[in-house]
Image (tube, rainbow, N blue to C red):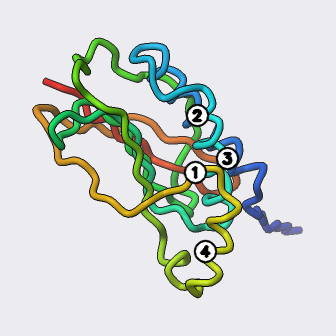
């Protein structure tokens, strides 16, 4: 006798919040080491990322510090919905970078699913988010290197993290 089964996994807001909470853990380490972003801003980012992930609208999310238009240290997350990522714990945020004279930044890029929405639907969804984003350009790489080091996943989707660290 032969038996088989099918595994069906639906990505939900609960999965998205799990992933966003891992990112928030990283951001809390940024706060601990560099005094930014604030706890209120971390909570806003957590909610924004969770909502964007749950709808499939997130492509990339980046938070870091820049000086003179160049990255000093940065956490860069790329969304994946293909079930290839495993879940790991938050952490591994580099400390000790010289951020004197630097400003904290965050950027978000949107998936094709986002751009497939009508402008009215995009505006309506944006109005529900706690972060009011304006168009801008991400900084260029300063003196440092990118390392892909972690992934956070649940329900068949997740984010892969890259870290830009100074030399």
Measure how far apart labels 3 and 1 are at the Cα level. 9 Å
Q: Earlier in the sequence, mark 4 or mark 2?
A: 2
Of labels 4 and 2, the one closer to you: 4
Residue 17, given in percent of the width and then of the height, sits at 71, 45
Q: Earlier in the sequence, mark 4 or mark 1?
A: 4
Local secondary structure at mark 4: helix
Q: Residues within 10 Å of mark 2 (few under 14, many from 20)?
A: many
Measure how far apart labels 2 and 3 are at the Cα level. 9 Å
Depth check, front residue: 127 or 13: 127
Residue on which disc 4 sits: 123
Depth check, front residue: 61 or 135: 135
Q: Residue at x 58, y 58 (%)?
A: 83
Q: Earlier in the sequence, mark 2 or mark 3?
A: 2
Residue 149, given in percent of the width and then of the height, sits at 37, 34
Of labels 1 and 2, the one closer to you: 1
Measure how far apart labels 4 and 1 are at the Cα level. 13 Å
Residue on which disc 3 sits: 47
Q: Is residue 113 above or below residue 27?
A: below
Measure how far apart labels 3 and 4 are at the Cα level. 17 Å
**Circles 3 and 4: CB atoms closer than 8 Å:** no
Q: Earlier in the sequence, mark 1 or mark 2?
A: 2
User: Which label sits on residue 131?
Assistant: 1
Residue on which disc 2 sits: 42
Direction from residue 114 to residue 65 in the image, left or right: left
Measure how far apart labels 1 and 2 are at the Cα level. 10 Å
**Circles 4 and 2: CB atoms closer than 8 Å:** no
Q: Residues within 10 Å of mark 3 (few under 14, many from 20)?
A: many
Q: Is residue 152 above or below residue 35?
A: below
Q: Earlier in the sequence, mark 3 or mark 4?
A: 3
């Amino acid at each position: 006798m032969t038996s088989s089964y099918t595994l069906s996994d639906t990505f939900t807001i609960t999965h998205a919040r799990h992933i966003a909470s891992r990112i928030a853990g990283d951001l809390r380490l940024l706060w601990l080491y560099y005094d930014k972003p604030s706890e209120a801003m971390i909570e806003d980012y957590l909610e924004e990322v969770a909502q964007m992930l749950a709808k499939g609208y997130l492509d990339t999310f980046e938070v870091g510090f820049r000086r003179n238009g160049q990255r000093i240290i940065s956490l860069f997350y790329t969304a994946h919905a293909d079930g290839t990522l495993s879940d790991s714990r938050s952490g591994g945020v580099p400390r000790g970078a010289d951020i004197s004279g630097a400003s904290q930044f965050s950027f978000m890029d949107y998936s094709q699913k986002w751009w497939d929405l009508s402008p009215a639907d995009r505006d309506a969804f944006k109005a529900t988010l706690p972060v009011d984003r304006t168009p801008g350009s991400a900084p260029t790489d300063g003196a440092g290197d990118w390392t892909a080091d972690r992934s956070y996943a649940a329900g068949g989707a997740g984010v892969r993290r890259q870290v830009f660290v100074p030399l």
